[in-house]
Amino acid sequence: MMSSLPPPGRKTLPARGRPWNELHEALSALRSADTDWRHGRDSLEVYYAGEDVLDVARRAYTMFISENARAPQFPSLQRMQDDLIDISLSLLGGGPRACGTITCGGAESALLAVRSAYRSFRARRPQVRRPHLLVPSSVHPVYEQAAEMMGLELIRVAIGGDYRASVQTLSQCIEAETMMIVASAPSLPFGAIDPIEALGRIACEREVWLHVDACIGGFLAPHVTRSAAGVPRFDLAVPGVRSLAADLHKFGYAANGVSVLLYADADDHTHQAFEYDQWPKGLWRSQTLSGTLAGGAVAAAWAVMHYLGESGYRSLAQRVMHLRDRYLEGIDRIGGLHVLGQPDLSVIAFGSDEFDIHAVGDTMQARGWHISRLSTPAALHMTVTPVHDQAVEAYLDDLARCVHQYR
Ligand SMILES: *Cc1c(COP(=O)(O)O)cnc(C)c1O
């Protein structure tokens, strides 16, 4: 083989290593353009519950930084995963036959849920060549990716005027090829929990697998329901729900890289397994898509859950819901803006019939806010988290100024 020179500009491995103090400096410099997420100026992707929680996560993470949570020689990490699944099942309505798996994120949970539903369907109806996945248009694109990867047809249907999945439209679209319906709790764009109970009834009647994407709400809603009323039911206790995904690295406040996929019935979970033995090392078994799972992420999730406990999560949930209300009241007071639908938890989206809301977003961005937006309908969007209590007033003041400029 001819050796080739790297093209100019391509980074190569340095010939000699450098000491940590130099690297620390270099990393800090690299980081200088990153968002400073401790100050509540981000509207998405930051789940920061305070220095104490972060410190617990960091210490637990570094204790298990070299361990692979899926390797058999670490029973500690197996035990932590079992605990995380048990705790998740108890929070999310798991009955005696329920079980689950720790994954590295919501996307992996989604891909596995689709695969399990597909294998279950194929076992029952092998004659269907291209099964259908039926989803409201508000579900996360990872289900499109799942369909593409597995050669399934995805049918995306319009949501209702309330920004929730339309039970009527979905039920009209069920055909003999329909293997699965996916609904969200809540949806990422609009923050509304889909009508899971009604969808569950249809799923039972028509023998279709109902999967709930509770990546956002899974570890927030259980702590809200007990303090405030009015969060629609969505969990494994709802008849018809076969699987549910919830992200520990979102409102579980864990370090990145950990999510749970739960099943109402252990029989459905069996479809997740993959085994192969025709290679030199004999039997290889996998329950997941990713092989190695960061031991640190599992340990951090376990430690944070036990650090916060029910009371800690409950008070964080109250803070989040109170903050959400402050944003909603503030947005309402400014005038010319309207919130899309009814946010059930902490995700809100708002638009305007009077002016270009994206232009407002651009001006907010120029003022140092990291603005998340929706394209259709045009809206600004955010996930309220505890860190926003430092920023809510400044955000609303700036928003009022920006809106004034465009009105
Ligand atoms: C975050 C999210 C996902 C994807 O999860 P990752 O943890 O980023 O892989 C899927 N669905 C919804 C609704 C989400 O909010």
Image (cartoon, rainbow, N blue to C red):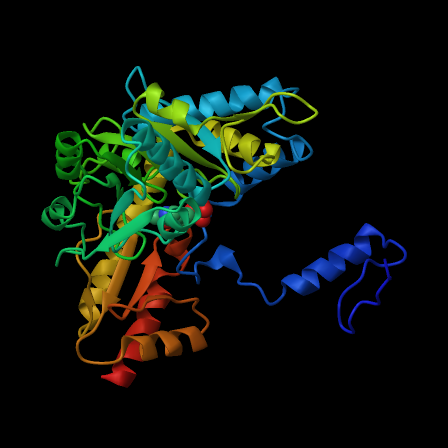
Residue lying farthest to the top in this orientation: 96
In the rendered picture of this protein, how many numbered marks are placed on residues?
A: 0
Residue 38 shows in this picture? yes
Location of the C terminus (image quadrant): bottom left
Left or right: 216 as drawn, with respect to 20: left
Q: Residue 211's x, y, as percent?
A: 29, 37
Residue lying farthest to the front in this orientation: 127
Instruction: Determine which quarter of the picture holds residue 364.
Output: bottom left
Q: Is residue 44 above or below residue 290?
A: below
- Asked whether 20 or 377 is in front, the reply is 377
Q: Residue at x 46, y 41 (%)?
A: 108
Q: Residue at x 20, y 73 (%)?
A: 352
Left or right: 366 as drawn, with respect to 69: left
Q: Residue 292's x, y, as percent?
A: 61, 35
Residue lying farthest to the right in this orientation: 16
Left or right: 373 as drawn, with respect to 345: right
Q: Is residue 72 above or below residue 16?
A: above
Location of the N terminus (image quadrant): bottom right
- Asked whether 257 or 305 is in front, the reply is 257
Q: Residue at x 44, y 63 (%)?
A: 41
Instruction: Determine which quarter of the picture holds residue 212.
Output: top left
- Asked whether 366 or 109 is in front, the reply is 109
Q: Residue 103's x, y, as percent?
A: 48, 35
Q: Is residue 346 above or below residue 378?
A: above
Q: Residue 14's x, y, as percent?
A: 85, 59
Residue 252 shows in this picture? no
